[in-house]
Each structure stands twice: as structure tokens, then as C-alpha cells.
Image (cartoon, rainbow, N blue to C red):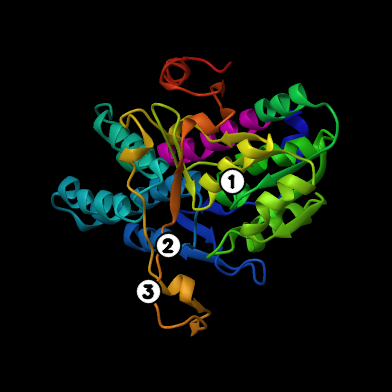
Amino acid sequence: MRERLLAAEKVKAIEWRDGTLHLLDQRKLPIEEQWLAYGSAAEVARAIRDMVVRGAPAIGIAAAYGLVLGLRARLAEGGDWRAALEADFEVLADSRPTAVNLFWALNRMRERLDHLKPGEDLYPAMEAEAVAIHDSDREANLTMAQFGVDLIRKHMARPQSLLTHCNTGALATGGFGTALGVIRAAHLDGLIERVYADETRPWLQGSRLTAWELAGEGVPVSLNADSAAAHLMKTRSITWVIVGADRITANGDVANKIGTYQLAVNAMHHGVRFMVVAPSSTIDMSLETGDEIIIEERPGHELLEVHGQRFAAEVEAINPVFDVTPADLIDAIVTEKGVVERPDAKKMAELMNRKRLH
């Protein structure tokens, strides 16, 4: 399976070349494939905030490279580079509040900085750490894909219809994808009859990104309005809803793209299994429950306008980017450390205490 997955890696959203971060502008897809180059921490933070790069793992990877760019600039300026670098940590941390991978990556970079060996060359060491974060996410994607396929096959070893929300593929990660990685692997294993992709308002990540990724690989995919999901569960023999996550708390509650919570409620009503796929860096054991997660709200014009042209009435718009799905609505959380079925605080703690992959 691993060899087939590696051969199927066709899309990427992040490249680090010659000391410059290159990001595929996901705001332009699928109409235009445009790569943008970034040379400073502030520019990378802006790219994260403006949705050039999105998806929790990809945001964390981009932030790690952003800090490398910041370090290079601070060293060139001279003086107290360490104090100046704190501003880069801060601007990157402030770019998106909900996705914990961002803070995990920055914390890992800080730990590397704090544990430099005497005489170790600073910039190459930090650059290598950012590359390692990128590579480790790619490896985690491959492992999760296998775990997820095994779980799907365990419950039904024939082609099935699945439903997914937002974009959790190569565009959202450093490699094969999380939830969409499982779906792509299931297709390679002959387990996919059809994928139903929610359009995912208001940024239309399902319409623009997920459908684009799947169609480009020959995966049978149908696009649907978010509000059609319950009807499809009732009428199209869907067996799994498979989604990603931006933060998972110690009890197994999951913050993900707005609309995920209602999918989980509808899935339980219709007897459809619900799978969350995310690397262990998404799990925040410092928060006991999802009630403690800060939910990002973006400007209302994202709901009221299309390409800068207002189409809605003159009203206030409420635009939360994420919601929280309680653990008791989730059948399985799939990570590179293993699978937790029917998650709770005890099972999540056991997962995070594992030293090796299972």
C-alpha cells in the first residue's frame, strides 16, 4: 500500500526551495494554479491569515518555514536577534487562532532553538527542523491512510459511498492528506463507489479544492450543497462521513470546519459511521473539552459578497469558521499513532502516551 500511495502523490501546496517558501495560492484554484514566493515571517503570517495556505497541518508547516525566514532576517540585522525573533513568533501565532498545529509547530521550533548544542550552526539547524516538521507530516499522512483503509475494510469489504467536508487532502497537508488521504487510499484499494463532497461554504473548499483533487485522480466524486448532506445519507447508502480536524481536546471533542457538527448529528441519526482523521499534533491535551476551544470568526463580507460584489440583503452576517463535534458523536479518531474508537478521555490519554506507532 505504501508504495502505491507514494506513487499517487501528485498534488502539493508547499515547497521550500533555495531559502524561499513557495505556496500554491489556494484562493485561485481550480481556475488558476499560481505559486507565490515568501521571504519573511510577516509575509507568511499574512498568507495564512488570507487563506493562501489553509488546512491545519499545512498552516503549521508554513509557520515553521516562516520562522526560519524570520530568523535569517534577524541574524542579518544584528543586535539582539533573539528578542527580535519573538515578534516573528507572535505574528505567526496570531495568524489563525483555532488550528492547534500552528502552535505545535511554533513550539517545536522554539524547543529546537532552546536546545541548540554549543557551536551548532543556528540557521541550518532551524531550517532542518522546519524541513523535518514537513517530512514528518508527510509520513504521518501515509500511516493514517493505511489505518483508515483498514477501518473501512473492517466494517465492509466492498465498494462504498463516503461523504466528506471541506478539504483535507494534499492541499491541506504536507503530503497525501488526512481524511482525503484515507479516501484516496480507499480508492486505490477498490473500496470507493462514490465520494460526496460538501461544497463547504463560504470559501467553497469542497467545490474548488476537494472535487478538483479527487477528479484529477479519477475518483468518482459528486458535489453537493452542504444542506443536502442529510438527504444524501438517507437516499444514497453512504457508509462513512470522513473529516479532518483543526483541534482535538483531551476528551476527544473535535473542532473542524463549520458544518462538521451537524454532519455528525445527521450521521448518528442515519446510522452512518463518523471518522475523524488528523495527526497527533492536532490533539491538544491541555484542553479538557471542546468548550475551551477558541472558535475563529471571520469577516461577514465572506458570506455577503462574491468576488467583492454584494449579493445579500443589508443585514449582519455571522461567520464562525469552525464548530465543535462532541466525542460521543464520533466513531473513530485516526492518527499516525493509532485508532481510537468511541473516543473518551481515557482512550485519548492512552493514545498520546504511545511511544511507537501501532
- Reading the image, the residue beneath label 2 is 47
Q: Which mark is residue 316?
A: 3
Quadrant of the image occupied by residue 150 = top right
Q: Nearer the viewer, residue 332 or 318?
A: 318
In this figure, what is the number of numbered marks?
Answer: 3
Residue at 69% of width from left, 28% of height from top?
146
- Give the side of residue 230 with respect to residue 217, left or right: left
Residue type, numbered disc 2:
Ala
Residue 328 seen in the current view: yes
Residue at 32% of width from left, 53% of height from top?
92
As measured in the structure, the alpha-carbon distance from the residue carrying label 3 to the one carrying label 2 is 27 Å
88 over 345 or under it: above or below: below
**Of the residues under marks 3 and 2, which one precedes in the sequence?**
2
Quadrant of the image occupied by residue 1 = top right
**Of the residues under marks 1 and 3, which one precedes in the sequence?**
1
Q: Which residues are magenta?
A: 128-145
Few, some or many C-alpha atoms within 10 Å of disc 3 (few <14, some 14-19, many ≥20)?
few
**SS assignment at label 3:** loop
Residue 235 position in % (x across, y down): 78, 48
Would you say residue 63 sits in the magenta stretch?
no
**SS assignment at label 1:** helix
As measured in the structure, the alpha-carbon distance from the residue carrying label 2 to the one carrying label 1 is 29 Å
- Give the side of residue 59 with respect to residue 276, left or right: left
Q: Nearer the viewer, mark 2 or mark 1?
A: 1
- Reading the image, the residue beneath label 1 is 263
345 over 272 or under it: above or below: above
Residue type, numbered disc 1:
Leu
Residue 177 position in % (x across, y down): 62, 42
Would you say residue 141 sits in the magenta stretch?
yes
Few, some or many C-alpha atoms within 10 Å of disc 2 (few <14, some 14-19, many ≥20)?
many
Residue 8 position in % (x across, y down): 75, 42
- Give the side of residue 224 with respect to residue 120, left or right: right
